[in-house]
Image (tube, rainbow, N blue to C red):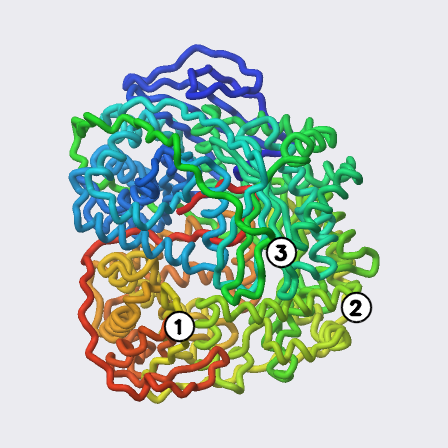
Amino acid sequence: MNLRFLSTLGLALMTTVSLAQQKPAAKAPATKTALATTPGGTRLVEKVTKQPGQLVIPYEKYVLPNGLTLIVSEDHSDPLVHVDVTYHVGSAREQIGKSGFAHFFEHMMFQGSDHVGDQQHFKLVTAAGGTLNGSTNQDRTNYFETLPSNQLETGLWLEADRMGFLLDAVSQKKFEIQRSTVKNERGQNYDNRPYGLASEYISKTLYPYGHPYSWLTIGYLEDLDRADLQDLKNFFLRWYGPNNATLTVGGDVQPAQVVKLVEKYFGPIKRGPSVPVQKLPEPVLTADRYVSYTDNVRFPMLQMVFPTVPHGHPDEMPLDALAEIIGGGKSSLLYKNLVKNQKTVQAQAYQQNSELGGFFDFVALPFPGKTLDSTEVIIRNTMREFEKKGITDEDVQRFKAQTEAQNVSGLASVQGKVSQLAANQTFFGNPNYITVETKRLQALTKADVQRVYDKYIKGKHAVVLSVLPKTGSVAAAKPDNYTIDKSGYKAPDYGYNGLKYTKATDTFDRNKQPKSGANPVVKVPALYQETLPNGLKVVGTRNTEIPAVTMRLTIRGGHRLEQTMPGKAGIAELTAGMLNEGSEKYTGEEISAALDKLGSSVFVNADDNETTVYVQSLTKNLPATMALLDQRLLHPRFDAQDFDRVKKQQLEKIANFANQPGVIADLTYNRLLYGQNNIAGTAVAGTTASVSSLTLADVKDYYNKYYAPNVSYLVAVGDVDQATLDKQLGFLKNWAKKDVTIPTDVAGAQPDKTTIYFVNKPGAAQSEIRVGYLTDMKYDATGPYYRAYLANYLLGGAFNSRINLNLRENKGYTYGARSGFAGTRYAGPFTAQAGVRADATAPSVKEFMSEISNYPNGISDEELAFVQSSVGQSDALRYETGQQKAGFLARLVEYNLDPTYVQQQTEILKNLKKEDVQAIAKQYLPADKMAIVVVGDNKQLPALQALGYPVVELDLEGKPVAAEMMKKSVPAPTEMAVPTDEKMKMQTDNGGKIKTKTKKGKS
């Protein structure tokens, strides 16, 4: 299912005028009013208003004469605005031989248009203090910006220009650059990532040949290679008309002003070809389809996938509930039968729905030594156990509570609200579709869940995928038995013939970027704070925007405490893991079920410098949640069986590092920078040797010594005032003080000269690169560290930084490159990094070092103005959500800051000079004394050696290896033939990770 932002608290009735939609959708009772039309011909067709005590996203919905749907959501809680343009086209409008077009085109939409120059889209938004991106999935493509509210007109001007004036600015050079970028993206997120191709195998096995869901949104490399510029232009002309788009604007805006600006910038754009609703039959499996492939993984994986229903189908909600009940947490049968008894590293069930179909998925990753055929037997036996056990009212209640809490949380940001309105309009023609889903959630019964199990799972056939380690040590669950049938395929006629590009005729000059209003006044959250007698500091701020509370309890120390006991490295993480299990009152399953019933979470995590307890609760459930926090934090069970399982999982996690090039690079880099005497050079998870030696007595001892209130602080954000919160803190007030000493910093190992350290990863399609050194800077808010952050912003901190524009946009070596300074209470490193195409390894290192070496030569007036504008206007985006506010409060306490440091930073930024940046770069970028770590195939070694730096080959443990290759003479590297110039956008993608309750898609 899609992420859905709804609540069982009830929704407001609306005053509405109906509009003929792309597809019929159930709607809440409505009162009709007279139709409103502006002088420009824009019709107000619907208005939803907020009523007291009810959770709703208020909005007004308009339609322009050219067919563009406009949704405006007025929300003055923060001085920012979010603009989203969603086009109802994704990879489902592609065909065999032309996959990946929708996503490729998303990249091209950032490459400039008639009135917006090359590399200006990102630069203009970033300079305005905003953020932006785009994403593509099977069914839609969207583009979005979050900006300070005074930049609304700039956001609309940019989006309108690429909707109406793109094609003449599309060149063959830009086309080739972005084709290279997309290839890098596929390599990074699919081909070179463990389990990255699992979804591709599922898609082409589940759906018939030619079905638009039978390939991934990223497409196939061979299809990208055969694409030409005209194909891309036809795609734009066919699908990117205003009548196939929804423009949604939310935040600190006035609807009348938004309508006026939209009419100005979007109104003249011509309507595109009509877009019919697409419907295809759901796949039918007449037998179980077994498929397999090998991957560079430690744990084999089994997936059993059953076809279900499209997004919006009435059975979607009970199927979501079924997935949660049978395989969603510690109270599920899958957990009991596979994880609890240490047969698998993880096991879960989830279900996913898209516009044309959906599926229900069982996923399990067995421990080494376990087989996939036995895992399949256990899953099938679990299904039979479920049939006998049935569903309880409590099962359904837990699902409802979790869904309510998730959806309330989704309303914390203006982006969350806007995204939901846009998606519901796009897929259902009804921005307020949450009313439908709310009713379905409230009406859900255990009989509904049982019914969908019987209809879609029981006795039905599935796609069974086996992902096998390349070691050959594991066999598939069963031999492959399915061959794709290509007969009968007929390519769809999407109407590409005779398309013409007709530009809008304007009465104003689009070349002029709109002027922005005065910078919005950003209010730092009002705080309350106290220190309890036992030394625990409590800091909070009240915000009533949503009925929820976010808390963060930080216990200083974490991994750094292991400095005095390096032989027990990993004990901080192992102890945190044990606290996530049972308590004195409850087993791990019972406390998990109790939290689920509240829709709450209490999770403990150990990191480099602290252990953090994250707490999330609906306001109404705060007392019950705090009682469970008491149990989890102060009354852990420390059960021996739990210990054996958690320890084994941690050991397997460490062993799995060797299969992840990015992790290998980070671990190698840290060892080199921090040296043998600093625990920061060891992974937080520890080593196989150190964790193997740990006992349950060690964990108890660590907990009893180092979990203490006098080295801790609690931050609370949300719908709770100080007096109410104080009543909930009795158990924390009784937490006993302890004598805890946090280790001081230990100097790292400074290199005498820049050296390349190479780790061989045979067959790697990409190389991971880390460049840097350990500075002497600790975090500060207004001193050298903050000034170094400002200086690096232009080098590698922003999307259009020198490093990223060079390696990604000009050279096409990578999907994204960056640099930055890191510091806490301990000195941290300067690091530049990227994952690059294998054949671009040595050239990438050369470019990294060139950019770092040249940066102290100085910056331009334009660059200085950019960093001042971008950083200076970004405050509006910093304090919006509960998590953001909690992070701000935690920083105040951690570093003993006064909230006025924000104003001090503003003054430093305003007075920043080019000479300041140059001086910082000269001081903190010693290009002649850096460690360069490269993890990749050793075929790249000769070219690296030819760069002229000393090269040391290391093994996975960081020890030098003798290699005959090191002794051989090395030919001079050849210059790579690559395109030059351009820009795009950095984005993240879950790749091969298991996703739950989200549409399969891609950025």
Query: On the image, numbered disc 3 is attached to which residue?
Result: 372
Q: Quadrant of residue 911?
A: bottom left
Whether 746 is drawn above or below 818: the answer is below
Whether 99 is drawn above or below 176: the answer is above
Comparing labels 2 and 3, the label whose residue is closer to the camera = 3
Query: On the image, numbered disc 2 is attached to which residue?
Result: 640
Marks 2/3: CA distance? 28 Å
Residue 935's disc number? 1
In percent of width and height, residue 254 lies at 39, 31
Identify the residue at image location x=40%, y=86%.
Answer: 750
Q: Quadrant of residue 507?
A: top left
Q: Earlier in the sequence, mark 1 or mark 2?
A: 2
Q: What secondary structure is marked by label 2?
A: helix
Label 2, residues with CA under 10 Å away: few <14, some 14-19, many ≥20:
few
Give the residue type at disc 3.
Leu
| Residue 455 visible, this orientation | yes
The answer to whether the residue labelled 2 contacts the one labelled 3, judged by CB atoms less than 8 Å apart, is no
In percent of width and height, residue 1 lies at 55, 37
Give the residue type at disc 1.
Val
Comparing labels 1 and 3, the label whose residue is closer to the camera = 3
Q: What secondary structure is marked by label 3?
A: helix
Query: Which is nearer the eye, 555 or 693?
Result: 693
Give the residue type at disc 2.
Ala
Whether 966 is drawn above or below 1003: the answer is below
Whether 551 is drawn above or below 576: the answer is above
In percent of width and height, residue 638 lies at 78, 67
